[in-house]
Amino acid sequence: MDIRNLGRQGLAAAALGYGAMGTATGYGPADDTESIAAIRKAHELGVTMFDTAEMYGWGDGEKLLGQALAPIRDDVVIATKFGLTRSFGSNSRPEHIREVVEASLRNLRVDTIDVLYQHRPDPNVPIEDVIGTMKEFVEAGKVRYLGLSEADEATIRAAHAVHPISVLQSEYSIFARDVEPLFPVLEELGIGFVAYSPLARGFLSGAVASRESYDANDFRQHIPWWAPENFDANVAVVDELTALAVSKGATLAQLSLAWLLTRKDYIVPIPGSRNPQRVDQNVTAADLVLAPEDLVAIERIAPTGGAGGRM
């Protein structure tokens, strides 16, 4: 795969990465053996960026990713995040950041975290204090690059003034387009972009099912795209996109990932799958060429994203 530069501080990664949330939480029961096989398959196919977080299983996700990547640690970029509580509140107090980062280093079995993100802005802690604390780990050699997740323009600018931000991570897909107004700011400041949930939490995976098909603790139970008043309209969009994908000899997931790769050359989508065969299929999207008329068709089919919006 092509290598994409993320920011101006030296961070680079293959055009497609791997999001590890589903290996530990959010999408029903997981099999660790299969998840580890999927992670290693992704690396075999050229993926270099692997993304996790403290809250993905509250350490379990980091431990699994660390185990999977231990034999190839020097070949990959490992990213993790801090800042959420078990009740999905915010906690980016400096002393808490220090505790979490030290735990993440142990969980991941690494001496240095390649990318450290604040998982969400904390309304109770000035971003200058947050970045100042993150900067301590850079100066100590325990973190290489800093990132933000789901931050607005004011937060990005304030953070970047304290220490260079290499990458912003936010949800982005054919179904979720609300981050696009931030692209001029990222280009001005020289910040890369990592797109999480590039397959719209599975709605663009080619295997979408109604809300009743998922476990009660499945994340999708709470997402508006699956709400009864939105589901049928979104399935209709998926049907049209699938027909376009088939005309290209591709799957819906491949079409969706290839579309993201055309948006900007500093975007790295991080699809996640616990299935090695699905990982193989996703990575193949990097080879799919979309013609101008394909991009026009996608805009016609889904001009404003999925009905209902994301959470």
Image (cartoon, rainbow, N blue to C red):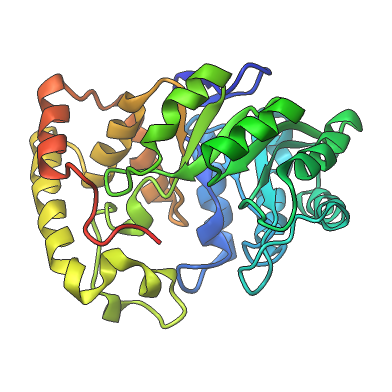
153 relative to 72 in the view: left or right: left
Picture residue at 63% right of the left edge, 51% below the top: 121
Q: Quadrant of the N terminus?
A: top left
Q: Which of these two is toward me, 86 or 54?
A: 86
Picture residue at 28% right of the left edge, 49% below the top: 175
244 relative to 137 in the view: left or right: left
Picture residue at 10% right of the left edge, 58% below the top: 236
Q: Mark yes or no: residue 49 visible.
A: no
Q: Which of these two is toward me, 264 or 49?
A: 264
Tally of numbered tags: 0
Residue 276 pos. (x, y %): 44, 50
54 relative to 279 in the view: left or right: right
Q: Quadrant of the C terminus?
A: bottom left
Picture residue at 66% right of the left edge, 51% below the top: 65
Q: Which of these two is toward me, 68 or 13?
A: 13
The image quarter containing residue 233 is bottom left
Q: Is residue 215 above or below residue 68?
A: below
Q: Mark yes or no: residue 102 visible.
A: yes
Outermost residue toward the right? 140
Residue 72 pos. (x, y %): 69, 35
Q: Is residue 18 above or below residue 218?
A: above
Residue 42 pos. (x, y %): 50, 40
Residue 197 pos. (x, y %): 42, 50
Q: Which of these two is toward me, 81 or 62?
A: 81
